[in-house]
Amino acid sequence: MKFTHRFLIITAVFITCVITANVIAVKVISIGPLVLPAAIIIFPFSYIFGDVITEVYGYHRARQVIWLAYACNLLFVAFVWFAQIIPGADFWEGQQAYETILGVVPRMLLASFAGGIVGEFANSFVLSRMKVLTSGRWLWMRTIASTIVGQGLDTALFIIIAYYGSANFAPIMILYHWLAKTAIEALATPLTYFTVSRLKRKEKIDAYDEEVNYNPFSLTQEK
């Protein structure tokens, strides 16, 4: 399959969501009684566009995009860290603010990458397998089910790795973060339907992963 401009746009948006979510996660917001990171607004959209890629182009392409996204994310983090350790100008007073917002915390970085990668691959796998098992029917059920699994693993891994053993850790955090992310994607189901149907029509493709290799580390498409 050639890389069409539509595929490249979806890929770019997916990568943007992944990187942006990590940057804005440092801000804490309130939604009713819940206190959540600002990334809660953006990060579910990476799953939405991940669903679109898997549904239209297949697991093989989704696997490539996921690894590309986190490679770009790692490169972004490296550049941010490099800028952080370079001595600032004598008159510049923003070092503390820079480190507060963009500073690299190894434990948080590990939590973000572990949760994100495992969650995205689980989401793509579940959606792909359910598509084959349902003969492509009930997209809404497949996207929500894959999100429940993917976001559940993502959220659990992130919070456990990032906060376990600290005063900020509370298992209930996993539940309400997971529910909030899943609810956002469920509400965005019409957007998913619109994007998927339009892409399938324009691209003239509707991938079914009947012979795909699901190993996330494999570079080959078939079993």
Image: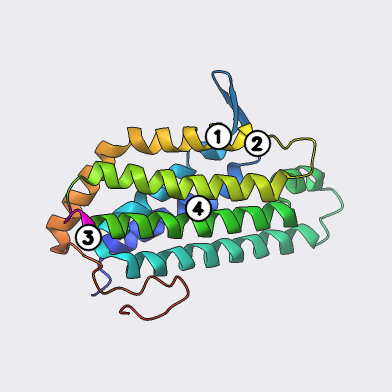
Mark nearer the N terminus (2 vs 3): 3
Label 2 and label 3: CA atoms lie apart by 35 Å
Binning the other alpha carbons within 10 Å of mark 2 as few (below 14), some (14 to 19) or many (20 upward) gives few
What secondary structure is found at the residue carrying circle 4?
helix
Mark nearer the N terminus (4 vs 1): 4
**Residue 122 percent coordinates (x, y):** 44, 57
The answer to whether the residues at label 2 and label 3 have Cβ atoms under 8 Å apart is no
- Image side of residue 123 versus residue 129, left or right: right
- Amino acid type, mark 2: Pro
Mark number for residue 175? 1
**Residue 102 percent coordinates (x, y):** 69, 49
What secondary structure is found at the residue carrying circle 2?
loop
**Residue picked out by circle 2:** 171
The stretch drawn in magenta includes residue 74: no
Residue at screen point 60% across, 50% down? 157
- Amino acid type, mark 1: Leu
Circle 2 or circle 4, nearest the eye: 2
**Residue 220 percent coordinates (x, y):** 36, 81
The stretch drawn in magenta includes residue 133: yes
What secondary structure is found at the residue carrying circle 3?
helix
**Residue picked out by circle 3:** 132
Mark number for residue 211? none
- Image side of residue 204 versus residue 83, left or right: left
Circle 3 or circle 4, nearest the eye: 3
Residue at screen point 26% across, 60% down? 6
